[in-house]
Amino acid sequence: MSRPTLLDNVTHRDLRVRPERSAALGDARHYALALPAEFRHLQAHFPIVFQHVEGDVGFQPIVLFGLQEGQNLFLTDAGWDATAVPMAMQREPFLIGRASDDTLQLHIDMDSPRIVRLGEGEAGTALFMPHGGFSEYLEQVVRLMESLHEQAQNLPAFIEALMSHQLLEPFVLDMEMPGGQQARLTGLFTINEERLASLPGSVLEVLSQDGHLMPIFLQIASLSQLPMLAERAARR
C-alpha cells in the first residue's frame, strides 16, 4: 500500500529520504518497469522483456533482476551492483499527481520505508533547504520525474506499434539452478525476430521515423543478458 501526499516545504520540512539500495528499502524485487528511452543503458546490464498488463496499453516492458519472486540478483551487501537503475526505481518514494487544473504535482509516499524524519537516527538526504527552497537532491528528483512522465506518455505508441505488426510473442525461460533444480519464468513476451525481419522496408522506415526501431533492436540485444542472470543466480 502507498499513501501519496502532496509535497510541500512546510509539512515536510524535516523529511529525509534514503536513496541507497537495499532489500529493507523495497528493492527485493525481480523486475521493474523499463521505458524505451532507457533501453540503451539498461540493456548493458539486464534482460528486457514484456509482460501483459490490464488496461488499454496491454503490455509493458520490464527489466529482469532475478528468476523468481522477490529475488534481486543485483542487490549486494555493498549496494547496487550495476551502473544503471531504471527510472521507475530511481523515482521512489516520489509520485506524479495532478492538481484540479490538470497541472502536474510532486507527491511523496508517506508509507515508503525510504522516508525518515530529522532526529530519528537515520541520515537520509534532505528535501528542503533551511530557508524552504529545494535541495539539490530534490531538484534532481524533479528533473527525473519530468523525464519519467514524458517518456511514459510515449510508451502506448511504442506498444501499439509492436502489436499492430504482431511483433510480440510469448516465451518461457527455463534455467538449471545449482543442485540441478529447474527455474522457470512464464508470462513473458519478447520480439519475434523472424516477424521483424519479414516486415517491408516501408514499415521499418516508419518504425524508425517514429523512434521505435532502435528500442526494438536494443530489446533483442538485451536478451544476451539472460545467461549472465543465470550465472548470478548460480553464484548466489
Image: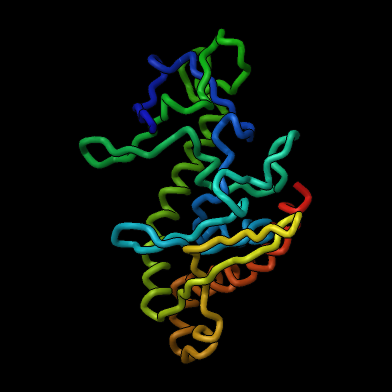
Q: Is residue 228 above or below residue 69?
A: below
Q: Residue at x 51, y 14 (%)?
A: 117
Residue 77 picture location, percent across and down: 74, 34
Residue 21 picture location, percent across and down: 63, 35
Residue 68 picture location, percent across and down: 58, 51
Quadrant in which residue 2 is drawn: top left
From the viewer's side, name the closer residue of 11 and 122: 122
Q: Residue at x 49, y 57 (%)?
A: 35
Q: Residue at x 56, y 43 (%)?
A: 70
Q: Residue at x 62, y 56 (%)?
A: 42
The residue positioned farthest toward the right in the image shown: 235
- Rendered-image quadrant of the N terminus: top left
Q: In the drawing, does residue 166 fall left or right of residue 74?
A: left
Q: Is residue 120 above or below residue 159?
A: above
Residue 181 picture location, percent across and down: 69, 57
From the viewer's side, name the closer residue of 151 and 53: 53
The residue positioned farthest toward the left in the image shown: 100
Q: Is residue 21 above or below residue 18?
A: below
From the viewer's side, name the closer residue of 56 and 76: 76
Q: In the drawing, does residue 79 fall left or right of residue 140?
A: right
The residue positioned farthest toward the front in the image shown: 180
Q: In the drawing, does residue 110 fall left or right of residue 55?
A: right
Quadrant in which residue 4 is drawn: top left
